[in-house]
Image (cartoon, rainbow, N blue to C red):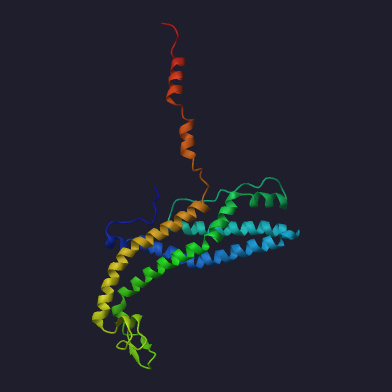
C-alpha cells in the first residue's frame, strides 16, 4: 500500500531529519516556476482559441487548446506523484463521432477539462501566494540557522554615510549604533549564535506548517485533476442495500408454507 510522502511525526527533530519537510519544500518551490509556466501556457492557449473561435480557423485551435490544457494538467499530475504516490489520472470523455466538430464538442463539454482549467488558471494565484509565503518563511528560518557562518560577510551602507559588516534583522537607517534603530543588528558571534538558536526552534515548529501547506496544495490538485467523485456515493450504496423489512420478506419467501 502506497503512503503519502507528507507524513507527520510527533517528534519535531525526527521530522526535520525525515523526507517529509524537504519533499514538501521542493513541491512548493517547484510550483513557483512550473505552475507559473503552465499558467502562462494554458492561459495563452485558452485566450487564443477563444478569440479566434469566431472564425472557422479558430475551431481547430480550440481543439488544440483543450489538448494543451490537458497536457499542462498531466504535468501537474506527474508533480503530484512526488508527494502523493497514489495513482491519479484525469477521466476524460471519449470523443464520439468523427471530425473536428465532434472533437470540439467532446473536449469542451467535458467537465474534466473545466476542472483542469479551474486548477491551472483559477487556483493559480491563491496557490502561488500560499506556497510562496510558506516556502519563504521556512527558508528564512533555515538560513538563520547558518547565520554564525556568514554573519560577518555582508557589508551594509547606511543613510548617514557610514558602513559596517553584519546582518540586520530589523530597521537600522543610521547604522547598528545609530538612532533610530529597531530590531537586532548581528555583528558579533554571540548575537549570531543567539539568532541561530531561535531559528532552530522556529524551523522545527514551522516544518509542520510547511507540510500542512503542501498537503493542502496536493489535496486541491487531487480534487480538481483527479476523477470526479460523487459526494453522495456512500449514501447511495446504503440505500441500495436491502433493509431489515426487505430481508425478512425474502426469508419468508424461502421458508415453505407447509408444516
Specify whether residue 81 is in view.
no
Q: Residue at x 34, y 60 (%)?
A: 208
Residue 108 x/y as whole percent: 64, 52
Q: Residue at x 33, y 89 (%)?
A: 164
Relative placement, left or right, of 183 versus 251 is left
The residue at the far right in this view is 56
The residue at the far left in this view is 190
Q: Residue at x 49, y 51 (%)?
A: 223
The residue at the far bottom in this view is 161
Along the viewing direction, whichever of 97 and 183 lies nearer the viewer: 183
Which corner quadrant of the image does residue 7 belong to?
A: bottom left
The residue at the far front in this view is 180
Relative placement, left or right, of 163 versus 249 is left
Residue 186 x/y as whole percent: 29, 82
Q: Residue at x 38, y 69 (%)?
A: 137
Specify whether residue 121 is in view.
yes
**Vertical position of residue 93 compared to residue 32: above or below:** above
Along the viewing direction, whichever of 87 and 32 lies nearer the viewer: 32
Residue 101 x/y as whole percent: 72, 51
The image quadrant where one finds the C terminus is: top left
Amino acid at each position: 500500500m502506497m503512503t503519502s510522502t507528507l507524513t507527520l511525526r510527533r517528534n519535531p527533530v525526527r521530522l526535520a531529519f525525515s523526507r517529509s519537510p524537504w519533499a514538501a519544500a521542493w513541491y512548493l518551490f517547484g510550483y513557483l516556476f512550473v505552475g507559473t509556466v503552465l499558467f502562462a501556457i494554458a492561459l495563452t492557449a485558452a485566450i487564443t482559441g477563444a478569440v479566434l473561435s469566431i472564425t472557422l480557423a479558430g475551431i481547430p485551435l480550440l481543439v488544440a487548446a483543450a489538448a494543451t490544457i490537458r497536457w499542462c494538467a498531466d504535468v501537474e499530475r506527474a508533480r503530484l506523484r512526488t508527494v502523493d504516490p497514489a495513482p491519479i489520472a484525469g477521466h476524460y470523455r471519449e470523443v464520439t463521432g468523427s471530425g473536428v466538430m465532434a472533437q470540439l464538442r467532446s473536449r469542451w463539454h467535458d467537465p474534466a477539462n473545466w476542472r483542469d482549467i479551474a486548477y491551472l488558471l483559477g487556483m493559480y494565484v491563491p496557490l502561488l501566494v500560499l506556497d510562496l509565503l510558506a516556502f519563504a518563511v521556512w527558508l528564512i528560518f533555515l538560513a538563520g540557522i547558518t547565520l554564525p557562518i556568514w554573519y560577518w560577510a555582508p557589508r551594509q551602507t547606511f543613510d548617514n554615510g557610514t558602513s559596517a559588516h553584519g546582518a540586520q534583522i530589523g530597521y537600522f537607517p543610521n547604522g547598528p549604533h545609530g538612532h533610530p534603530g529597531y530590531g537586532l543588528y548581528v555583528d558579533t558571534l554571540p548575537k549570531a549564535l543567539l539568532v541561530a538558536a531561535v531559528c532552530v526552534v522556529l524551523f522545527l515548529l514551522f516544518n509542520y506548517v510547511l507540510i500542512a501547506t503542501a498537503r493542502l496544495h496536493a489535496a486541491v490538485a487531487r480534487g480538481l485533476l483527479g476523477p470526479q467523485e460523487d459526494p453522495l456515493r456512500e449514501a447511495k450504496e446504503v440505500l441500495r442495500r436491502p433493509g431489515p423489512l426487505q430481508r425478512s420478506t425474502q426469508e419468508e419467501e424461502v421458508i415453505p408454507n407447509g408444516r
